[in-house]
Image (cartoon, rainbow, N blue to C red):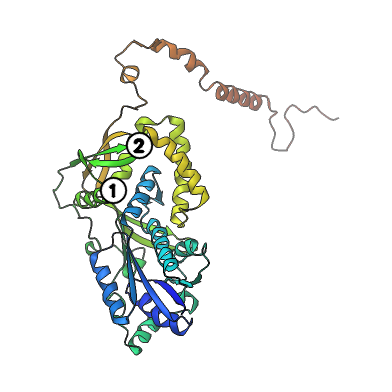
Amino acid sequence: MSRVALAFSGGLDTTVCVPLLEEEYGYDEVIGVTVDVGQPESEFEEAEETADALGLDLHVVDAKEEFADLCLDAVAANATYQGYPLGTALARPVIAEAILEVAEQEDCEGIAHGCTGKGNDQLRFEAVWRGSDLEVIAPVRELGLTREWEIEFADERDLPVEAGDGGIWSIDQNLWSRAIEGGELEHPNYVPPEDIYQWTEEPAEGADDPELIEIEFEQGVPVAVDGEAMEPVALIEHLNQYAGQYGVGRTDVMEDRMLGLKVRENYEHPAATVLLTAHQALEDLVLTKEERSFKKGIEQEWAEKAYEGLVFAPLVDALDAFVAETQDVVTGTATVKVQGGSCRAVARDSEYAVYSEEMASFNTEDVAGIAQEDATGVAKYHGLQERLANSVKAGLEDSSPAITDGGESENAEDEE
């Protein structure tokens, strides 16, 4: 008996894929796999109800802890893509790995998803799956299915769907972020209505009271909020709710996808915003100028590979090694102020601070053998080459022969 594992959500695309995998691809049995990375409970209910109606064997895998750990790796790397914290991109490899494990345990010969041929997710799933010996199948892409065709097909077969999710927007939600797209949001000049948001509240008029949030880090990992120790999943959930009350963590961006398409996306990510802001503030205190400068390139590469769904690539292992080395001293606290939709660092403290109040203060005269007048020699040399270069350039310009309108030098001798 030939089996295929299907990434199953219970929505229109994956529901239609079930009979297609049997009829068009010749599989005897389809196994559904749903992976929990922090979606709403209603999504699991929909998947289970649809699977029951289809007679589908559904496996539900809890991967919240693995996903939370990867999100905190992204914090250590200060990873953002085109200005927003990565969320969906981080979740896809975790989901893909979990589905692959089920497929191999159940002796499947194939593995399938319901992604279209225009998005990023097809690439992120398959980057993981194509490292196996299983046949990788994408019915929606390979058969050129449209939403209208799927709706008609589902109606003809009496499949347990209601023309998709029945919503105006396409929403992808996990522990770390909530992405909203589709509908009128596809128009760049469309102003989103307030009802697209669920995690963040629009600050009420006159509601200017700020709140301070202290994040404690141990070697780059957030371990406590306002003095209360928390495990990663609970810490992220707490900050999503807490900071979301202040409207923190909204992003509206024109995003460049991997296939070259530019799309409009709206995101909510309160916890990610707070943790990234706090982590950066603490790094600024404990890392040297050279470390901070060099790490920016590492962070950009990490974010790009993560966006592509390639967090398991050898390059990322190497990037992680550098990041981990820098995080040895990222221990301490950072305090952020959340107010009116903004989040900014206002304090930081660490025993590893690369900072001396005595040396930096204007009110001290001589500390550790260093006095103000010691900087005189440095000041004389600073910019020396630039001053010399400008002097040479000015001298050459002054000695250049002037050219008359007739094209001859004013100093040229008479040829007669």
Instruction: Determine which residue is flagged by label 1.
Output: 232
**SS for dot 1:** helix
Badge 2 crowding class, 10 Å Cα cut-off, few under 14, some 14 to 19, many 20 or more, is some
Place of residue 406 in the rendered image (x, y in percent of width and height, measured from the top left): 72, 38
Instruction: Work out whether mark 2 precedes mark 1 in sequence or the reverse, and give the earlier one.
Output: 2
Place of residue 309 in the rendered image (x, y in percent of width and height, measured from the top left): 45, 57
The kind of residue tagged 1 is: Pro
Q: Nearer the viewer, residue 399 or 8?
A: 8
* Count of labels in the image: 2
Place of residue 263 in the rendered image (x, y in percent of width and height, measured from the top left): 41, 63
Q: Nearer the viewer, residue 403 or 392?
A: 392
Residue visible at 35% across and 24% down? 355
Query: Is 18 displayed left or right of 405 in the figure?
Result: left
Badge 1 crowding class, 10 Å Cα cut-off, few under 14, some 14 to 19, many 20 or more, is many
Query: Up-down: is 292 above or below 44?
Result: above
Instruction: Determine which residue is flagged by label 2.
Output: 219
Residue visible at 52% across and 50% down? 314
Query: Is 405 displayed left or right of 252 in the figure?
Result: right
